[in-house]
Image (cartoon, rainbow, N blue to C red):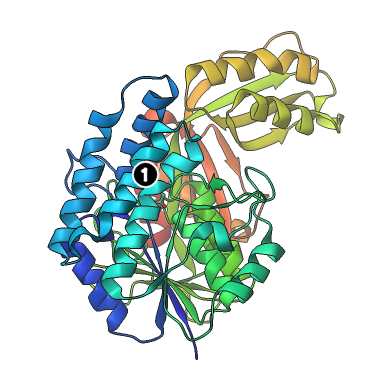
Amino acid sequence: MSTVVAKFGGTSVANAAQIKKVAAIVRADERRRIVVVSAPGKRDRQDEKITDTLIACHALAARGRPFRDRFAPISDRFRELARQLGIGGDMDPWVDEVEDLIASGADQSAVVSRGEYLCAHMIARYLGFEFVDATEIIEFSDATTVDAAATDRRIAVRLNGNARYVIPGFYGGRTDGSVQLFTRGGSDISAALVARGIGAESYENWTDVSGLLSADPRIVDSPRPIAEVSYRRLREFAFLGAAVFHEEAVSPAASRSIPIVIRNTNAPDHPGTTIAAASESEPRITGVAGRDAIHLVSVERSGLGKDVEAAGAIGRAARDAGVALVHLGFGADSGTALVAATTTEALDAFLGAIPAAVGCDNVAPPEAVAMVGVVGENVARSAALMAAAVGALEAASIPVMGVTADYSPFSFFFVVPDERYAEATKALYGAAVSG
Ligand code: ASP
C-alpha cells in the first residue's frame, strides 16, 4: 500500500483546535499513515515554543538551579491539551517522566527533544496510531551526521508497510541509543529521512503558509506563489537565503525522487508548493532571495589567488570561529569572504585568525552588506536578465559592491550595502519576476 509521510510543524500542533485540524487532514486520506510532529509552537506572539522552554529548563538544571517553575507551563500545557482532546490523564506519566529526566541531569539533547516526544505520544493516542520513538529509526554516526544506510535499514525493520505511526521529529539516536538532536527546525529532516526509508509516495510538510513564495512577503507585496520547483533550484533558493523549509531536508527525498509538498494546515484545500525533479511546467524564474547582516571581509596578499591552500585555511578559520562562510572569491593578490556571524565575538575570532591562515599582515574592518539574487532556469547564463537586474539596481541608485554568477547556472547574486537590502530585493523582483 502506498504511503504518504505527513509532517506537522509547531504551529499545526500549538493548541487543541489545531490538533483537530491535523486529525481531519490525516483521516481525509488513508495513505497518510506516517505522521511526524514538531513540538507545540507559539499560540500567539507572546507565547514561548515548548522547545525554547525546554532549553531554558535544561540550562537551569545544568547550573544546579531550580527549574520546576520554568517547567510548569510545559506540564500544564500538555495536561490541558490532553483534557481538551478527550484523552484525559493519559499524558500524566509522560510529563512526570520528563520532569524526572531534567532533574536527573540529562544532557541537552535528551531534554530539548522531549517537546517532540510528548507531542508524538499525545497525537498517537489521539489518532489511535502507534508511537515509534525516533531513537529506534534514525541513527546518527556522530553529533552532526546521520548514518543514511543504517537509518534505512532500521526503518525497513521497524516500520510495517500497512500500519499507522506517529514519530517525533527533531532527533534520532546515537549508536549507544541515547538521543541526538538535529539543528533547529530539524523535524523537516526527520520526516524526509522517514519518507526515504519507507519509499513514500510523497512527503507532505504541513505548516502555516500555503506553500512557498517567490520573494519575502515582508518586503515584496503579495509575491507570486511558487506552485512547482525542482529540488535543485529550491536548494539554490534556500542557499541564497529564502526562508523555506530546512535545506537539509531536500536531499533525502530527492535521492529517491519523492515529491515534497508544502501545505497549509489552516487551508487544507490549497495545493501548496510541490518540490520534485525538474518538470516542464516549472516557471522559468523561481524567485528572488537574499540575506542581510552579512560581513564582507577583504584580504590582500601577493599571490593569494594562486595559493591552493588559501580557501581551505579560510574555511577552517570560519568553522573554528563559529561563523558561517557564505561565499569566497579570489583575485591575483586579494580575496573576499562573505560571512554570517551570530555574535560579534565569533566575527572577531574569525578576523583575528585570518592573518595566520593566509599569511597577510592585517585585515581591514569588514563591511556591512547584504546579498540578493535571482534563482531560475539558466539565469546565470542570461545576459538579458542580468542586464535587467543591474539596470533595476542602477535605477534605484543602489551601489553594486559585487556580483557573482559563476557557481551555478540556476542563480546569481549581487552584494549591496546592508541598509539597501529591502530596496534591492524589490528592484530585482520587479526586474526578474513581475517585470
Ligand atoms: N521544535 C524544534 C524547533 O523549534 C524542531 C522543529 O520544530 O522542527 O526548532
Q: Residue at x 54, y 31 (%)?
A: 401
Position of 18 compared to 431: left or right? Answer: left
Callout 1 crowding tier (Cα within 10 Å): few <14, some 14–19, many ≥20: many
Indicate left or right for 289 with 333 as reference: left
Residue farthest top in this picture: 361
Q: State the residue position of label 1.
A: 98
48 vs 351: above or below:
below
* Location of residue 411 in the rendering, given as x and y in whole percent from the top left corner: 57, 55
Residue 121 picture quarter: bottom left
Mark 1 close to ligand 1, CB under 8 Å: no
243 and 8: which one is in front?
8
- Depth check, front residue: 396 or 120: 120
Placement of 304 over or under 121, stated as above or below: above
**Left or right of residue 53: residue 187:** right
Classify residue 190 as left or right of residue 254: left
**x%, y% of residue 93?**
31, 52
Q: Position of residue 181 (x, y in %)?
A: 52, 46
Above or below: residue 233 compared with residue 342: below
Quarter of image, res 361: top right
Q: Residue at x 30, y 48 (%)?
A: 95
Please indicate, yes or no, whether residue 166 appears anywhere in the rendered image: yes
Image x and y of residue 301, in percent: 78, 18
For label 1, the SS is: helix
Image quarter of the C terminus: bottom left
**Image quarter of residue 316:** top right
**Number of marks:** 1
Amino acid at dot 1: Val
Question: Visible in this render: residue 396?
Answer: no
Name the residue rendered at 78%, 20% in the picture: 358
Residue drawn 29% across and 46% down?
219
